[in-house]
């Protein structure tokens, strides 16, 4: 999948993260729900403080508008806090920092 340059999120299509749900320290699975009108093409997660986004977790997959995907955030490091970045089909982006996946079980992308 081609990586896109950072772009500003347009006012007409502003996506934000709304956090809900809970997860235990043993369960670092997070359900990503796309409640926008645009497909989520790329999703990145990195340990808080990392300077790299790592690879696109979705790979060739897409989370369609109205769809969801469950991601196991347990990378073996024991970390609970991650920064998330979502890139949509229209190249708009959302970055949310410091998500505690040991406490949060659901992340919603909304308009």
Image (cartoon, rainbow, N blue to C red):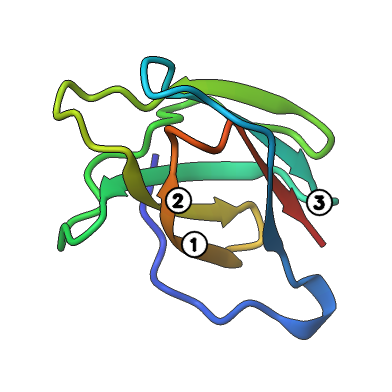
Q: Which residue is mark 3?
A: 36
Residue 34: assigned label: none
Packing grade of label 1 (10 A; few <14, some 14-19, many >=20) is: some
Q: Which residue is mark 2?
A: 99
SS for callout 2: strand
Residue 78: name its quadrant.
top left
Residue 56: name its quadrant.
top left
Along the line of sight, the residue nearer the viewer: 69 or 75: 75
**Disc with the residue nearer the chain's start (2 vs 3):** 3
**Disc with the residue nearer the chain's start (1 vs 3):** 3
Residue at x-position 22% and y-position 25%: 75
Along the line of sight, the residue nearer the viewer: 106 or 94: 106
What is the C-alpha distance between the residues marked 1 and 3?
A: 16 Å
Front of the two marks 1 and 3: 1
As displayed, is residue 70 above or below residue 39?
Answer: above
As displayed, is residue 42 above or below residue 59?
Answer: below
What is the C-alpha distance between the residues marked 2 and 3?
A: 20 Å
Q: Position of residue 70 (x, y in %)?
A: 57, 20
Residue at x-position 30% and y-position 22%: 74
Q: Position of residue 59 (x, y in %)?
A: 40, 29
SS for callout 3: loop
SS for callout 1: strand
What is the C-alpha distance between the residues marked 1 and 2?
A: 7 Å
Q: Please report contact status of discs 1 and 2: CB closer than 8 Å, yes or no.
A: yes
Front of the two marks 1 and 2: 2
Quarter of the image containing the N terminus?
top left
Q: Which residue is mark 1?
A: 96
Front of the two marks 2 and 3: 2
């Amino acid at each position: 999948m081609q990586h896109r340059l950072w772009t500003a999120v347009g006012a007409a299509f502003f996506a934000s993260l709304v956090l809900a749900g809970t997860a235990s320290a043993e369960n670092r699975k997070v359900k990503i729900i796309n409640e926008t009108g645009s497909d989520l093409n790329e999703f990145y997660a990195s340990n808080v403080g990392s300077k790299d986004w790592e690879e696109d977790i979705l790979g060739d997959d897409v989370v369609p508008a109205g769809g969801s995907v469950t991601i196991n955030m347990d990378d073996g490091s024991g970390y609970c806090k991650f920064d998330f970045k979502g890139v949509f089909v229209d190249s708009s982006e959302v970055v949310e920092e410091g998500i505690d996946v040991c406490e949060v079980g659901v992340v919603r992308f909304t308009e």
